[in-house]
Amino acid sequence: RVFVLDLASFSGLAGREMACYAIFGLNGSTDFLIGGFDLAIEGSASKLQIGTPTVDKLLQSDLDLAGKVVRNQNGIAFEAFRLANRQFQTSIDGRYASTFSDLALLAKIHNLNTISEQASGPLNVNVTVKGGGKSHALLAEVGVESGVLQNRAVRRLAAQFDGQINDKLLT
């Protein structure tokens, strides 16, 4: 088990106020020569603050974390990697590398009122990155089925970005 009593000691390094009490179980291996690792993670965090007010509002309740993360010469891979609490949930599965990517991220904010007094209702986000070589297709979809934005009722609101990641440029 790894015990992180308080992230405040990393505030200077991050350049912002941070705080957290966390307990994580790690099982796997690390390769310090290449900065690699293969870790199964399970744990929880309380009182998490990263110094970004909107994000900190989402992190108000206890956060559960579970899944597997691998970083090696083939890039970074996620297996059933999940973060969740009462305000939001997210999952990441797949691999991202310069040579090949097939990555999916799903996220849901259960009620937008958590981050804005002028909004309510659930927000869904789906992101996929696929491709290889110097070009990766990026598809991002954001939607509110039913809710309030800027104090106005919305239904079936959806936005989509369909683009490419080329040599670190997003088009």
Image (tube, grey):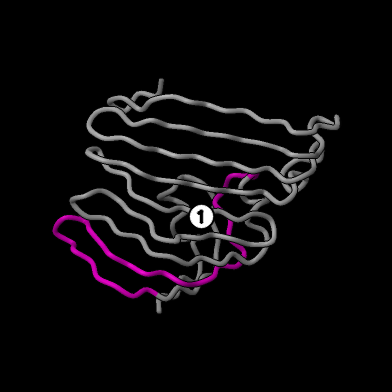
Q: Quadrant of the N terminus?
A: bottom left
Q: Tell how many labels.
A: 1
Tell me the element at label 1. strand
On screen, residue 14 versus residue 116, left or right, reads: left
Q: Quadrant of residue 120?
A: top right
70 magenta-colored = no
Tell me what residue is drawn at x 69 percent, y 61 percent: 86
On screen, residue 20 versus residue 71, left or right, reads: right
Q: Is residue 171 above or below residue 22?
A: above
Tell me what residue is drawn at x 21 percent, y 50 percent: 74
Return the x and y of residue 135 as percentages of the image width and height: 29, 28
Q: 17 or 105: nearer the eye?
A: 105
Query: Dot 1 corresponds to which residue?
Result: 91
Specify the principal SS of the magenta part.
strand
Q: 75 or 9: nearer the eye?
A: 75
Return the x and y of residue 85 as percentages of the image width and height: 64, 62
Return the x and y of residue 126 as percentages of the image width and height: 54, 41
Q: 97 or 128: nearer the eye?
A: 128
Tell me what residue is drawn at x 49 percent, y 61 percent: 7
Q: Specify the farthest residue to the left.
A: 33
Return the x and y of residue 160 as percentages of the image width and height: 57, 28
Instruction: Give the residues drawn in magenta, as a range.
Output: 26-54
